Amino acid sequence: MYRPERRSEAPNSKPSAFSAASMAATAAITTTSSPSLVDTLFQRSLDDVIRALRSSPSSASEETVISRALDEIRREIRSPDLDTKSVSLQKLTYLASLHHLDLSWAAFHALELLPSPSLPHARIGYLAASLSFHPSSTELLPLATHQLRKHFAPSPANPPALAASALHLLALASSPDLGRHLASDLLPLLSSQSAASSSLRAKAVATALRTLAVCPDVAPVLFKPLVDCLSSSDPRTVSAAVGAFCELALAAPDPFPYLPLAPEFYRLLVDSRNNWVLIKVLKIFARLAPLEPRLASRILDPICQLLRRSHAKSLVFECIRTILSSLTDHEEAVRLAVDKVKEFLSSDDDPNLRYLGLRALSMLGSAHPWVVEESKEAVIKSLSDPDTNIRIESLHLIVGMLCESNVVEICNLLNKYAMKSDPEFANEIIGAMLVTCGKNLYELILDFDWYVALLGEMVRNPHCAKGEEIERQLVDIGLRVRDARPELVRVARDLLIDPALLGNPFLFRVLSASAWVSGEYVEFSRNPVELVEALLQPRINLLPSLIRAVYIQSVFKVMSFCFISFIEQIQAVELLSVGGSTQRSEKNGEQSDTVPLKTTESNVSEGDHGDTTADTVLLLDLIDKKTNFTRESISDLMNLIETAVAPLSECEEVEVQERARNVLGLLFTLRETQFWNIEAAHELKSDKELSEIIELLEAAFSEELGPVSANAQKRVSVPEGLNLNANLSDLSKILTDYDLTPSASISFSLQSYNPQETKEDSVLAVEPSSLLAEHRKRHGLYYLSTHRDGDELNDYPRANEPLLPVDHGDATEDLVKLTTPSLVPRKSKPTKPRPVVIRLDEGDGTSTSHLTTVKKSDNLLSEAIRGVLLENESQPSLSGKLDTSSKRRENDASDNSELISQQTESVTLEHGNSSSRKSRQHRTHKERNESHFKNEDIEKSSRHSIKSSRQHRRHKHRQRGDVTADIVPQTPAIQDFLL
Amino acid sequence: MLGGQLISVLRREIVEEGDEKGVNSMGIRFVLLVNKQGQTRLAQYYAEHLTLDERRALEGEIVRKCLARTEQQCSFVEHRNYKIVYRRYASLFFLVGVDNDENELAILEFIHLFVETMDRHFGNVCELDIMFHLEKAHFMLEEMVMNGCIVETSKSNILAPIQLMEKAS
């Protein structure tokens, strides 16, 4: 089937030429193994396979071509003939590389080809190996050690191409063992001076970098030659060495050990004309400059010159990046860099430069707000760029400039802009606003009414998919910001009555939050009946069952609120009508007997002792607020609830069913009482059943929910005599006393409902709430204050209309508007004080943007390099001792640390200062925050301080060893350079 | 203003994330050549070992992201924890994955150099040249990039060993 003539069609194709040439030889030697002979004779070349693949019309037939080729390869690759083997490996490599096939099974065959005297064979072997070998998956790697060593050795038998392939393989598939064994073999390559091997030298440098990375123990061997490469006369070697040091310095958690090399880098910065080298050198300096202020002022001038003169945009950008990230203290340089950034931003034909310009601005951060202010127009124009990446960068810049004084204007405009953007970007905008405004417990927000309204508007965006975060913030603001609740309830109502929102599944969570907010803070609602209608509209069937359960629970709360209000109203009317002082004493007694229903009510009873007219005004006000409750409206409400909820009591979803039955249970209980006939408060009092129900309802929802700290549980001390680990086996004995027959729990059906039962329940239910009050009295520390000042709410003007009219005008029109507000924070007096945002300890919901993570201990590699810099003179012998050298170095360092004089000690302290300051700061911060919890915290903070001081000591100890290690060689180097 | 702080914190996080990987950090993470249909034409990963499934997923994601972009959009795309610098030449996309602090413009120049080198060798290089001479394309790349570092930027130096080998065979 595979006609040999086909090969003649492609005479240039090397592999087929090989197989043809080798045919005779193979036939002569291996006449016995006939299958492989056939394979050899009729082997398809790589080109044949590629042609077959290309001519296959569909992916299915491609699959069959591949699987057939694989079958062939599996047969051919076992051939003892190297030509056959190499061609089949070549085919396999091609298929594996481009069609994602497994190559690992052929690892041994690749290794087999490495020692071949024929260069093409060996290179095919190396290519297959370098594409598939990795220490984590290739067990055969140690088998390659010897062959690699042979190819590294400088000998005429090794052409540079072979050594290059060997280096490439080592660089890609280095395991610690391989690196350790071959490190010394890299040395001749690294130090050879001949021009012929200069390309190999550069490659050896890159490979040495990799070896250092996987196996830090070899640093004593390899580091010195790498440093020497920096001053080589061969530009390629220098370039590779700079690249290597750039990677080392960038990867090191602490680049301090590379500081002594600064003079070398400085020389390159001034002398080199190679942009690749300059870019790498600039990267190194960007890392080193913050460590040494003198270094920063020294490199400033050459960098600025490069910035002015260079025409290569890549180099210019690197200069900008270096200045804006590491040299921000030097105003003049920043000025220059910003001018260049502006050039970038204004290049209309090159989106790359515009993108990088925005990136550069965001690098500068908040230290120089004037920079973004100056380029404001370009930044805002980018918001409508055709490229999403550019738009996102500009969005982040704008959001990054938000502050208390401009947050309202900019967010309003951004939100309008989001309305007109494509879905993806609209969500980017919304997400960015949510993150920024919600940061650190809404620290940017002064006007919560506005913010809550903004959240409501975000939801109106048809593309909005950030429901989860909006849900979280709505509930969170409800819990934390008391003053925002009226507006919150208003926004929630608007969302609930909007049938359009039920169509967007991303917003279900927002609706759930709205339902919860309206139920929880229903006392701020203007029209509870309307709310119930919204909560029970037929389309809520579209919602998932858990959210419907929240809806029904809210109906429960609203209903009980309406009922209680109605009763209150009766009482108030009576108070008003009785009015005169003769009745007062009786009335007072009455009042104190009845449960104070709402805080407003208790205000009334207090005010009662004062002026009668003031009294009347208050009462009138009270009645005015709740005039909507007549007997009829309550009755209508109940009918409405009954018709809507009754079908749900048969609902298949248990959560919904259970809550629906709760609602109906309450409803029927209320109906059975005779409250319809009650005309006056004294009758109310006489109806014991009714007053108990009211009491019960009150107890159920009067306790205000608040945010709970994540650490709250830990702070509750275990009462004396309570053994938390005690066996609970006698619990069942106690439980039997209550006679919990299963029927009692199951018979929660409407038919068997018995009001008597609730009465008993009510006693039980009140008990926990009184226990809670008791607990609250004892452990008041742990509770949020319940003091509420509802009267202040009214002098809080509403910031916005619920729905800002969305004008569908030109997008640019809005953007122009966006340019008017300044992005720079202005000092403006807030017109009203920021409402209280409840904040718990530091673990509470903060974005932890300020928490500095403790730096990881320096990695092995930089320790090893410190060691090398310390032992400049005493070069360790190259082989044999490598395994123990790292340990020995540590000992040396600690020996040295015992010898340090007072002078170095002081340097040590200075160096370690930053960390100690950090930990101290951290501690005071913590103490301040937890001052309410002093008693418990004494123990905790002392433990903390012990721990931190221990950590600190350990840290310092290590620092001492390290720093002395650095100081010895470093001091002269730095001085030479800087003076 | 404080948002600026956030951005700088985010940047710091990116750097710290790189630090966690620590010693594996390097300039170029991978070089991919993909045609308009999204078929891989060359793939070389540096020190980042991915399983076959991971590779397939990664290449699929990148191709989806980059091929959908237009000429008016910039050549840089952020993906996972690195940046992709890409450039389109006729029907071929050259995609290079780099660390976040790598110089994007320099990588664009590198891509251009790679294309020019192949162009010089093959003469008006096209997708088919790379398909049928994948090995050579790999050798050129091998000469240019070692362990993710660019070690050679002279076209004649890059091509010298390949020409030598062709002469020998």
Image (tube, coloured by chain):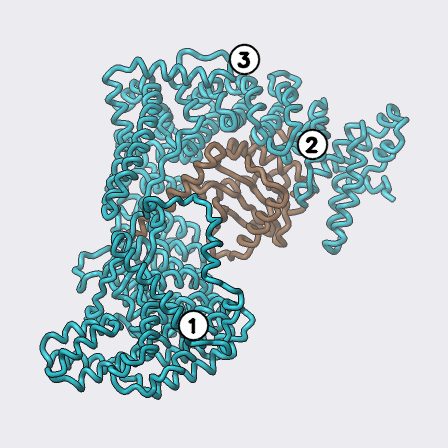
Chain colours: A cyan, B brown
* Circle 3 SS class: loop
Mark 1 / mark 2, whichever is N-terminal: 2
Q: Is the residue marked by circle 3 packed among few (<14), some (14-19), or many (20+) residues within 10 Å?
A: few
Q: In this figure, which residue is indicated by the disc labeled 2?
A: A107
Q: Amino acid at mark 1?
A: Glu
Q: Could you tell whether A411 is left or right of B159 in the image? A: left
Q: Is residue A614 above or below residue A704?
A: below
Mark 1 / mark 3, whichever is N-terminal: 1
Instruction: Pinpoint the chain carrying mark 1.
Output: A
Q: Could you tell whether A960 is left or right of A137 in the image? A: left
Residue A146's spot in the image, x, y percent? 65, 19
Q: In this figure, which residue is indicated by the disc labeled 3?
A: A880
- Front residue of A134/A962: it is A962
Of badges 1 and 3, nearer the viewer stands 1
Residue at image point 33% right, 23% down = A957
Residue at image point 28% right, 34% down = A945
Q: In this figure, which residue is indicated by the disc labeled 1?
A: A757
Image quadrant occupied by the C terminus of chain B: top right
* Circle 1 SS class: helix
Q: Is the residue marked by circle 2 packed among few (<14), some (14-19), or many (20+) residues within 10 Å?
A: some
